[in-house]
Amino acid sequence: MDAVRREEEEQGEKRSDVEPVKFQIRRLEQRNIFVTQLGEGRDEDENIRKFPVVKEGPSRLLEAPGAAPQETLLLRREVERRRIDAELEEARGRFRRRMEECGARGRQLQQRRREEEDRALQLQQVLREQDARTRRALARQRKERAETEAARGEAEQLRELLMQLQCRCQKLQRATGRCKVYEDFLRDALDRFPEGDAGGDGHDASGLIRRHTGLEAARVALLGRLGDLGRDLEQAQLQLAQLTRGFSHTSMVIHGEMSELRSRRERAQERCRAAEERLLALRQQHHTQGQELGAMLMAIDNLAESCYLRQYGSLQDMDSFSKLDMVQISKRNHEQNNQQRDDATDRQAFARDDRPGGVIMKRYLTRPKPLNQGVGTKTVFSSVLQK
């Protein structure tokens, strides 16, 4: 019975509190219902109790007394607002760092592209030097080949001359062998002639002897010349052998150098192709990053156009960070306006509803609200509850 009586008394007290609340809301509908509106101090009533915004640290939220729920709620909303501002500032810092990283990456790509171009120019210079060295080696080889061909032709001529001289020497030897019998006979005949004989026959024998002596001298001269030619031929053959060995050695050296130059040229070409592939990959990556950055800037421009505020000036003179600030302010104003409309609708419903105020306020407090809810609506409802 005591419990039932206590419940009836509580319901009576609630009914007694409803009438002032309705009366106060009707009076607020005639004027500005938001404390945060401009010019709210002109039409304020002294009987309306207003709660100032208590700016305390989040560590003191749990220490607040139980008789001040609105202050705790305001502090929580203030903490949420600070957290959102901190997150926005952190996102802005990340965006700024990302922009700086993109700029540094672009400079690195430009530096790397210049280095690749310098390296390509150096490789082209090396290839030109290798081509010039190869041309000089080929010209030297052609010259040595021409000299070798000339020496070989001269050796062939000397060999033919030696063969001719050998044939002639053999003919002379055969002729000398045939005339040897006559020479011996004439010498024997001269030995048999008397020493004082001065006839015509002796005169004919002296002519034959002189002729034989001349022929013998000519034969000796020819044999000496033949020996000289043989020695010259041997020297020419030695020189030809030396030239042949030198030509073989030079050819081997030149072929080795040419093979080494070809391998170096192939390696240089491989490096050039690899450098070109890396350069193309870097250009593609830079192009992709540029497209992403352009899409990001375009999105920021579109948001700035949709959320334009006049106090920020023209869009052409604003940078990306100013546009982001403007978008943030516009979004916050839009959420505040939406919350104000929702609060006005709830007040109208609260003014038209005849149920107890405790149930209505419980429904209002349990209704989901956005993070950036305005403070003016909360202040008005707290004043109504206190009344």
Image (cartoon, helix red, strand yellow):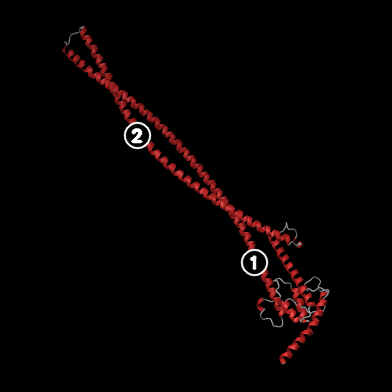
Specify the quadrant that holds the N terminus.
bottom right
**Residue closer to the observer: 263 or 114:** 263
Image-quadrant location for residue 21: bottom right
Tell me the crowding category of disc 1: few under 14, some 14 to 19, or many 20 or more residues within 10 angstroms, Cα based. Answer: few
Query: Disc 1 marks which amino acid?
Result: Glu
The secondary structure type at the circle numbered 2 is helix
Q: Is residue 56 left or right of residue 256?
A: right
Image-quadrant location for residue 108: bottom right
The secondary structure type at the circle numbered 1 is helix
Residue 55 in view (yes/no): no
Residue 231 in view (yes/no): yes
Q: State yes or no: discs 1 and 2 in contact (Cβ < 8 Å).
A: no
Measured as percent of width and height from the top left, residue 66 is found at 69, 83
Residue shown at the point (24%, 12%) measured from the top left: 207
Q: Is residue 145 above or below residue 160?
A: below
Q: Which residue is mark 1?
A: 90
Q: Is residue 179 left or right of residue 130?
A: left
Q: Which residue is mark 2?
A: 241
Tell me the crowding category of disc 2: few under 14, some 14 to 19, or many 20 or more residues within 10 angstroms, Cα based. Answer: few
Q: Is residue 223 above or below residue 249?
A: above
Specify the quadrant that holds the C terminus.
bottom right
